[in-house]
C-alpha cells in the first residue's frame, strides 16, 4: 500500500500522521486536514488553520500523492507557493503551511506495480553477422529505464526504487539502450 507520512511540531512535540492510499474509513479516499474534528481526519488546533483546509489523496493514474486546497480565503502554501486552485504533487521534503502551522512530508512509501517486460521490436534491417556485432559490454552500452515523467534514464537496478531525479515509479518506464556516459 502506498503511504505518505506528515510531520509537524505541536505544543513543542514532534507529531506524525500517515496517509494511506485507500483509507477504508473514508468513502472519498482522501485525508482531510483542518481544525474541525467532525469533517477532518487530521485535526490541527492552531487558530490560523481553517475548519476544513486541505485534503491529501493518492492518484493511481498519476502515481503519487496530491494536496488539494479546500479554502479560497486561506490557501495553503506549498514549497513557498500559494495553492489557490487545483492540486499539487507531494514529494518527500515538501513543506506545507496551513496558516502558521508547517507540515513536512517526512516520507513517501510506494509499491511498484507488476510489470510486463516486452522485448524490443525486431529490426527491419538485416543484422551484421554475429562475429561482427559487439556485445553491450564491448560497445560500452546497456539497457536502462526512461522515466515517464522527467525522461531521465536510470539503470535497471532502480526499478524498485524509482527515478532518482523526480521520484516517479519506474514500473511503466520504457526500456532504452544507454550509450556510454549516461547514468
Image (tube, helix red, strand yellow):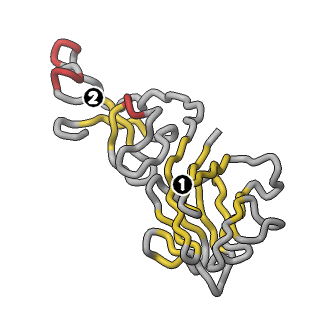
The residue nearer to you, when weighing 26 against 146, is 26
Label 1 close to label 2 by CB (< 8 Å): no
Disc number for residue 124: none
In the rendered image, the vertical position of residue 94 relative to residue 175, given as above or below: below
Q: Nearer the viewer, mark 1 or mark 2?
A: 1
Image spot of residue 46 (x, y percent)? 64, 73
- Asked whether residue 15 appears in the rendered view, the answer is yes
| Left or right: where 22 falls relative to 179 | right
| Left or right: where 8 falls relative to 128 | right
- Location of mark 1 (residue): 14
| Left or right: where 150 falls relative to 106 | left
Residue farthest toward the bottom in the current orientation of the protein: 73
In the rendered image, the vertical position of residue 3 relative to residue 70, given as above or below: above
Q: Residue at x 38, y 38 (%)?
A: 145
Q: Residue at x 49, y 51 (%)?
A: 106
Provide the secondary structure element on which disc 2 rests.
strand
Image spot of residue 53 (x, y percent)? 67, 73
Q: Which image quadrant: the C terminus?
A: top left
Disc number for residue 142: 2
Q: Residue at x 46, y 76 (%)?
A: 81
In the rendered image, the vertical position of residue 42 relative to residue 16, given as above or below: below
- Asked whether residue 89 appears in the rendered view, the answer is no
Category of crowding for the residue at label 2, using alpha-carbon neighbours closer than 10 angstroms: few (below 14), some (14–19), many (at least 20):
some
Amino acid at each position: 500500500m502506498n503511504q505518505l507520512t506528515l510531520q509537524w511540531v505541536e505544543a513543542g512535540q514532534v507529531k506524525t500522521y500517515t496517509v494511506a492510499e485507500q483509507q477504508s474509513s473514508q468513502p472519498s479516499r482522501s485525508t482531510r486536514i483542518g481544525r474541525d474534528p467532525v469533517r477532518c481526519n487530521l485535526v490541527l488546533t492552531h487558530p490560523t488553520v481553517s475548519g476544513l483546509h486541505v485534503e491529501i489523496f493518492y492518484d493511481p493514474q498519476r502515481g503519487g500523492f496530491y494536496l488539494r486546497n479546500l479554502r479560497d480565503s486561506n490557501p495553503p502554501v506549498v514549497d513557498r507557493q500559494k495553492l489557490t486552485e487545483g492540486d499539487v504533487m507531494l514529494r518527500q521534503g515538501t513543506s506545507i503551511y496551513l496558516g502558521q502551522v508547517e507540515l513536512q512530508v517526512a516520507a513517501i512509501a510506494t509499491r511498484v506495480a507488476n510489470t510486463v517486460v516486452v522485448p524490443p521490436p525486431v529490426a527491419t534491417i538485416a543484422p551484421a553477422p554475429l562475429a561482427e556485432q559487439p556485445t553491450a559490454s564491448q560497445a560500452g552500452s546497456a539497457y536502462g529505464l526512461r522515466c515517464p515523467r522527467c525522461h531521465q534514464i536510470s539503470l535497471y537496478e532502480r526499478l524498485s526504487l524509482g527515478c532518482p531525479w523526480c521520484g516517479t515509479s519506474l514500473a511503466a518506464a520504457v526500456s532504452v539502450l544507454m550509450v556510454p556516459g549516461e547514468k
